[in-house]
């Protein structure tokens, strides 16, 4: 253990006070960055995958990145989270394809074969005689615009529900056939010499009677306006009102009656609305299948990969305490051998201060080195003229690097600011190191054998009645064994890389407060986005309607359009800006969600990303779908009766609002939805793949670093945040489900978007980004919840919002199906459950101690790493790395020569390279791997089940070796590569579980594994005997091949014995 230091000792290693020379190695920085990505290890015979927790048994010359053709199974051996993510994309694309083939294709065929769009409207003037309507009338055809309408018939609107022009309340009068009627008693205006009302000059009639819904009419024009209604063949027009015998240009000659009657029977068939029931069933059935498939894949991957979590258990309910590690180890030893116990501590502020100090020190050293180089070059003569451009190029590159890495240009003022900041963080570290470190209630207990951990979970799994009595009457000794009077809860543990050590110690009331504040913060952010979108969408819609009216007015009156180029540019600007507002609000909401999720201080990365995923999915669906659809103008008042049209007044004003719906108008909701989905499929993936700023920094600007730490930071690969990736594909699915009933090509766009995302993210995750931490399987649960909710949301949007509740029986049927689906225990009936506490972890009876290289036949073989010829040129960085290496050597109780051996991770907080000695001493004291395991105690605890303890159960298990029977040959055909790329193959050179180091069978070059834990002193100094250790009966050996490890007593296990100097 590292000796304790006196108070006031600086928590960081000494830094150089003078200028630092440029001595960073770009090749070394790239090698360190490459080590943070997903990699595979190679040897002469097999290709084996490596994980952060467990790498291959014997490694060949070096490592390489995974191929983009790697199957989901291969990726799962390295990162289960990535495999589940790519599997989710594949499954969702399959769902969208099925929905298009079964639902969307029918909709698309019906819409395209019944196109009723038109660019003309009919102006009709009818004569009122007494209390009725005279059959005398005159009419004229009028055009709505001068645009080529043939292009409109093959546009996006042709493939939508609005192509029929069959529903008066949602059809757009800007591109649908309409009849505009005006009633008058002044028949003399239209009288001819024979006394019959006949057609006036067409242009004059169009100019005289403009649609009442236009916003640009004067008072005189409003008094003569005509009321426009959709020609859907179902309105009150009938043959008895028309003068069929008119041959003077009236109805008989113009064929207007036939034109109106031909629209009868063109309404949308009921089946178009009824197939929504099938859509609901398909989504719910797919959700069950997807949930089952993801859990099965997770179980298979877990069974074939050994991690620390297979041996560990998370203990909750300890409360704030000062117990020793061996106290809890002795308690847990009644279930089997214990390797180590790690308490969670109140070290959040200390770790944060150390991290900030490390970052600030790195920046300060970099600027000092830059200032030193500037001072060294200043006495040199001016450069020759031919090198002026080269000098300017390098000067700009250095300035950009300093700005992006250190936050300034390296001036004297910037240097002084960094020195003040470093001093401030040093004082903060000194203050935090003086604070008392407390154990804050949780612990991670690592067993030596997986079966012992399973028996612990079995013992603490009690019935609900027993748990209720235990919590209701805590003084009664009811339920599972207690530890020093504390009621404990055993939970599946996160992996060591998944733990956020600095976020422990937040009590329940404070966490509830943070959750409530976060919900209010996200609500406020969403409301801000809604207001911004509402304002710009309203302005855009008003400008668009004004544009339509001006074009119609100019065409009807034969005048020049009043829309000058400046107004047209303004309309286009608002249209573009409103789309940019959606993108900007999405970025704002994403940043807000990330900040609030970080502020909530989740104890694991899995919880953080699950919460972030939920926030992003909700806000993106609201901002990208619900808000644009809600603010898209569609006043759908009921059509007025004939008496209202004759009498005028408010009835005319009400019906004049019909046809102003912008859903199916040019540039309206449907076209915006199409382009939004298209941009969503291409733009984010292109931006992520190109990554101009990041690649510029990593590939070019990083070469201008003067210190190794700054160069390493500049070369670090970008993070692959699964929560943001899931939110993106969930937004794609939500847009397809909501817009699919009115725009069937949305399903095709979703398939295209998922394919592009799959290829892009696979390249980024396997070739460019950092490896995600091994997380718990929470993303699948979030996807299932999201799809269950979206099933009901898409029913509401389709039946109520877009279909205007024309057939309520289908809405009731869909809701009833969803309610029955949610109430029935289908997951239990279909076996869609996963209990990670009882499933096989794939350890095959091999001990944790063996995998740590502490026994023969286990891990700990030094890999043969390829020599790249990289040498350290930064002495400070080399010294810090050597100091960290010595620290980890003591932490693991292994010689420095064996530090690079492959072994499982242990539970230990992350420590910056430049962490102070006090911080190192605290971590060493609380998380150092003991020299020996704590032996199993045969006696039973009070309340312990007999089946979980006793001499037979705490002894090492029998060996369960499996033979390596087959090797899968690498696929070479094109079809096999395509199959693997889509995640359907089992892997390239897939090694069976029986031949991997994750099982009890080792490679031919290594000895057979057994249960021996050969305990040896890892230093050159001999250990002093522990005279006070009581003798315990040795556990009975069940297998001649698996011997009980050498152990020390429970009272002294966990602390290293005294050593002679």
Image (spheres, rainbow, N blue to C red):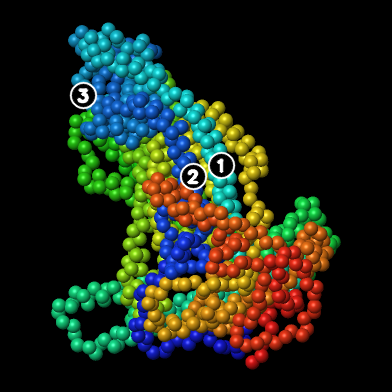
Q: Circle 3 — which element?
A: helix
Q: What is the quadrant of residue 1020 in the picture?
A: bottom right
Q: Position of residue 154 (x, y in %)?
A: 29, 32
Q: Is 230 situated above or below 864?
A: above
- Kindly indicate the quadrant of the structure image that contains residue 556: top left
**Front-most of residues 650 and 151:** 151
Image check: 474 left or right of 771?
right
Neighbours of disc 3 within 10 Å: few (<14), some (14-19), many (20+): few
Q: Is residue 42 above or below residue 835?
A: below
Q: Which image quadrant: the C terminus?
A: bottom right
* Neighbourhood count class around disc 1 (C-alpha, 10 Å): few under 14, some 14–19, many 20 upward: some
Q: Which residue is mark 1?
A: 289
864 relative to 1051 in the view: left or right: left
The N terminus appears in which quarter of the rendering?
bottom right
Q: Secondary structure at mark 1?
A: helix
Query: Residue 409 appears at what percent x and percent y?
Result: 33, 77
Depth check: 112 or 289 in front?
289
Q: Identify the disc placed on residue 204.
A: 3
Q: Earlier in the sequence, mark 1 or mark 3?
A: 3
Q: Are marks 2 and 1 in contact (CB under 8 Å)?
A: yes
Secondary structure under badge 2?
A: helix
Q: Quadrant of residue 200?
A: top left
Which residue appears at 21% of the width and 24% of the height? 204
Residue at the location (35% across, 28% down)? 112
Is residue 521 visible in this depiction of the protein? Answer: no
Residue under label 2, please give it. 91
């Amino acid at each position: 253990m590292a000796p304790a230091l006196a108070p006031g000792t600086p928590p960081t290693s000494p830094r150089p006070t003078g200028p630092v020379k440029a001595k960073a190695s770009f090749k070394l920085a790239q090698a360190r960055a490459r080590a943070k990505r997903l990699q595979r290890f190679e040897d002469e015979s097999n290709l084996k995958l490596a994980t952060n927790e467990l790498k291959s048994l014997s490694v060949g010359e070096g490592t390489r990145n995974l191929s983009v053709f790697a199957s989901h199974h291969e990726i799962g051996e390295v990162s289960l989270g990535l495999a589940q993510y790519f599997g989710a994309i594949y499954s969702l694309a399959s769902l969208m394809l099925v929905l298009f083939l079964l639902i969307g294709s029918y909709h698309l065929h019906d819409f395209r074969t019944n196109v009723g769009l038109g660019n003309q409207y009919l102006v009709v003037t009818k004569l009122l005689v007494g209390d009725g309507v005279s059959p005398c009338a005159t009419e004229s055809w009028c055009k709505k615009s001068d645009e080529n309408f043939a292009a409109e018939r093959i546009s996006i609107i042709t493939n939508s529900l609005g192509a029929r022009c069959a529903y008066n309340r949602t059809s757009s009068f800007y591109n649908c056939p309409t009849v505009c009627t005006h009633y008058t008693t002044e028949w003399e205006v239209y009288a001819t010499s024979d006394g019959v009302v006949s057609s006036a000059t067409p242009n004059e009639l169009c100019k005289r009677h403009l649609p009442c819904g236009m916003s640009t009419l004067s008072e005189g024009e409003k008094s003569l306006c005509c009321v426009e209604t959709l020609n859907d063949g179902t309105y009150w027009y009938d043959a008895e009102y028309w003068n069929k015998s008119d041959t003077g240009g009236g109805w008989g000659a113009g064929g207007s009656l036939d034109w109106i009657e031909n629209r009868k029977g063109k309404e949308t068939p009921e089946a178009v609305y009824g197939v929504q029931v099938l859509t609901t069933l398909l989504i719910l059935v797919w959700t069950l299948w997807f949930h089952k498939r993801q859990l099965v894949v997770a179980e298979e991957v877990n069974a074939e990969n050994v991690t620390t979590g297979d041996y560990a258990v998370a203990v909750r309910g300890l409360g704030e305490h000062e117990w020793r590690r061996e106290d809890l180890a002795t308690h847990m030893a009644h279930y089997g051998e214990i390797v180590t116990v790690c308490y969670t501590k109140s070290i959040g502020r200390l770790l944060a201060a150390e991290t900030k100090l490390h970052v600030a020190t790195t920046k300060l050293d970099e600027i000092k080195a830059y200032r030193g180089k500037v001072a060294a070059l200043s006495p040199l003569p001016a450069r020759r003229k031919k090198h002026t451009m080269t000098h300017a190029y390098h000067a700009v590159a250095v300035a950009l690097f300093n700005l992006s890495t250190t936050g300034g240009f390296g001036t004297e003022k910037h240097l002084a600011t960094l020195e003040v900041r470093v001093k401030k963080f040093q004082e903060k570290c000194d203050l935090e190191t003086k604070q008392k470190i407390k154990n804050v209630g949780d612990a991670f207990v690592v067993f030596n054998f997986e079966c012992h951990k399973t028996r612990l979970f079995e013992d603490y799994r009690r019935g609900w009645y027993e748990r209720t009595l235990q919590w209701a009457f805590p003084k009664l000794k009811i339920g599972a064994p207690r530890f020093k009077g504390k009621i404990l809860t055993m939970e599946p543990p996160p992996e060591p890389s998944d733990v956020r050590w600095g976020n422990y110690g937040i009590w329940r009331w404070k966490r509830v407060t943070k959750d409530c504040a976060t919900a209010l913060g996200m609500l406020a952010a969403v409301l801000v986005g809604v207001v911004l979108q509402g304002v710009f969408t309203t302005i855009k819609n008003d400008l668009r309607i004004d544009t339509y009216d001006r074009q119609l007015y100019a065409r009807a009156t034969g005048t020049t359009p009043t829309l000058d180029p400046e107004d047209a540019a303004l309309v286009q600007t608002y249209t573009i800006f409103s789309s940019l507002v959606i993108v900007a609000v999405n970025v704002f909401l994403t940043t807000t969600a990330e900040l609030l999720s970080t502020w909530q201080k989740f104890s694991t990365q899995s919880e953080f990303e699950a919460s972030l995923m939920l926030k992003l999915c909700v806000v993106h669906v609201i901002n990208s779908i619900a808000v644009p659809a809600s603010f898209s103008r569609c006043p759908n008042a009921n059509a007025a009766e004939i008496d209202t049209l004759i009498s005028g007044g408010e009835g005319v004003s009400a019906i004049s609002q019909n046809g102003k719906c912008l859903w199916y108008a040019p540039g309206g909701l449907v076209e915006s939805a199409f382009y939004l989905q298209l941009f969503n499929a291409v733009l984010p993936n292109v931006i992520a793949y190109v990554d101009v700023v990041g690649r510029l920094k990593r590939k070019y600007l990083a070469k201008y670093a003067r210190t190794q730490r700054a160069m390493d930071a500049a070369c670090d690969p970008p993070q692959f945040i699964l929560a943001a990736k899931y939110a993106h594909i969930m937004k794609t699915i939500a847009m397809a489900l909501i817009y699919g009933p009115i725009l069937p090509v949305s399903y095709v766009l979703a398939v295209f978007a998922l394919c592009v995302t799959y290829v892009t993210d696979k390249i980024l995750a396997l070739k460019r980004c950092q490896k995600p931490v091994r997380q718990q399987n929470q993303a699948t649960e979030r996807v299932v919840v999201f799809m269950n909710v979206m099933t009901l949301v898409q029913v509401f949007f389709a039946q109520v919002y877009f279909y205007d509740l024309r057939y309520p029986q289908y809405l009731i049927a869909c809701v009833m199906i969803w309610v029955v689906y949610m109430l029935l225990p289908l997951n239990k009936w279909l076996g869609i459950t996963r209990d990670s506490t009882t499933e096989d972890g794939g350890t095959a009876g091999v001990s944790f101690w063996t995998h740590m290289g502490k026994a023969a036949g286990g891990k700990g073989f030094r890999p043969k790493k390829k020599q790249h010829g990289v040498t350290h040129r930064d002495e400070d960085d080399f010294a810090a790395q050597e100091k960290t290496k010595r620290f980890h050597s003591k932490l693991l109780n292994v010689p420095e020569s064996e530090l690079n051996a492959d072994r499982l991770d242990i539970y230990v907080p992350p420590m910056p390279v430049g962490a102070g000695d006090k911080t190192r001493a605290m971590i060493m004291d609380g998380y150092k791997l003991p020299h020996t395991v704590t032996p199993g105690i045969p006696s039973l605890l009070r309340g312990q089940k007999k089946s979980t303890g006793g001499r037979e159960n705490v002894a090492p298990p029998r060996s369960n070796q499996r033979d390596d029977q087959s090797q899968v040959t690498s696929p070479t055909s094109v079809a096999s590569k395509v199959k693997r790329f889509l995640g359907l193959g089992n892997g390239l050179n897939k090694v069976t579980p029986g031949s991997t180091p994750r099982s009890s069978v080792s490679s031919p070059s290594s000895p057979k594994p057994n249960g021996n834990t050969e305990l040896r002193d890892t230093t050159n100094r001999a250990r002093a005997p522990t005279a006070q250790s009581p003798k315990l009966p040795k556990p009975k050996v069940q297998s001649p091949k698996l011997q009980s490890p050498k152990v020390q007593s429970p009272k002294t296990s966990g602390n290293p014995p005294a050593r002679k100097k």
